[in-house]
Amino acid sequence: MPPPFEAGPEEDRNMAVDVSTPKTRTRLLEAAAELFAEKGFNGTTVRDICHRAEANVAAVNYHFKNKRQLYDAVIRTAIEFALHSFPLNPPRRIQPTPEERLYHFVLAFLRRRLDKNRPDWQRRLLMREMANPGPGTRSLVAEIVERNHDLLLGIVREILHQHHATANDRQLHLVMASIVGQCLFFQPGHFALQSIHRHLDLSQRGLPGIARHITDFSLAAIRGLHS
């Protein structure tokens, strides 16, 4: 699994005055990620970031031009980590059935939210961004959402075709919303999960079982559309 940031050559942390080094850029990204996730874009200042990164304020201008572009770089880092670590498509070396593709989509969707190897700041920041995209990242977030939408739409249509079932556009999008909604229920920190469903295993060992349930439940509903 790739690291959330690509570190450059080793350097002494006391040499942060050298704004041009790759290590300084990495420290800025790490500090900004935590602060943006904690306080949001407007609640975080460049001085806050530089203080935590032990970097000169000029380093932000050198590597990112301004706070807006630094924020965009952090968002892109989080999205690329998810895309590479938890791909929604099965490996190309196998030729899965539509049902298997749906299971893989659901499992990867869950892992993006619950995998312990994913830095917590990524979840918090992307949840904030999905709810209220900033002007600089709106198009990037929309691109990812649209890509996921098109992938799931193709899977559902294949399943319907396989079972000689039909659905209008409204039904299709309600089915897709139901599938995604089931996945989003298993969101870290969800009150119901903490207080009511303590028996659920949300570890990496337990996620395949949850994904299988969501898949089977959804398949039964999809197949029933024509009945």
Image: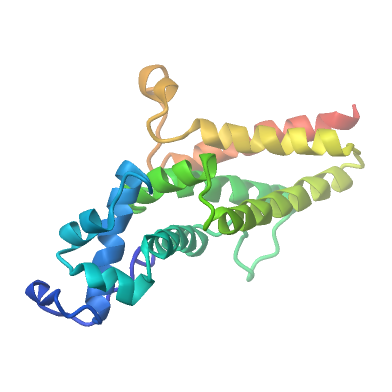
**Residue in the image at 77% along x and 52% along y:** 154
Q: Nearer the viewer, residue 58 or 80?
A: 58
Tally of numbered tags:
0
Query: Which corner quadrant holds the N terminus?
Result: bottom left
Look at the image and tell me whether residue 147 can be seen.
yes
**Residue in the image at 42% along x and 27% along y:** 190
Task: Estimate the x, y position of residue 59 in percent, counting from the top left.
Answer: 25, 72
Task: Estimate the x, y position of residue 11 in percent, counting from the top left.
Answer: 14, 80
Task: Estimate the x, y position of residue 213 in percent, counting from the top left.
Answer: 59, 34
Query: Which corner quadrant holds the C terminus?
Result: top right
138 left or right of 174 in image: left
Q: Quadrant of residue 77?
A: bottom left
**Residue in the image at 38% along x and 63% along y:** 70
Look at the image and tell me whether residue 204 can be seen.
no
Task: Estimate the x, y position of residue 152 in percent, counting from the top left.
Answer: 70, 49
Q: Nearer the viewer, residue 30 or 109?
A: 30
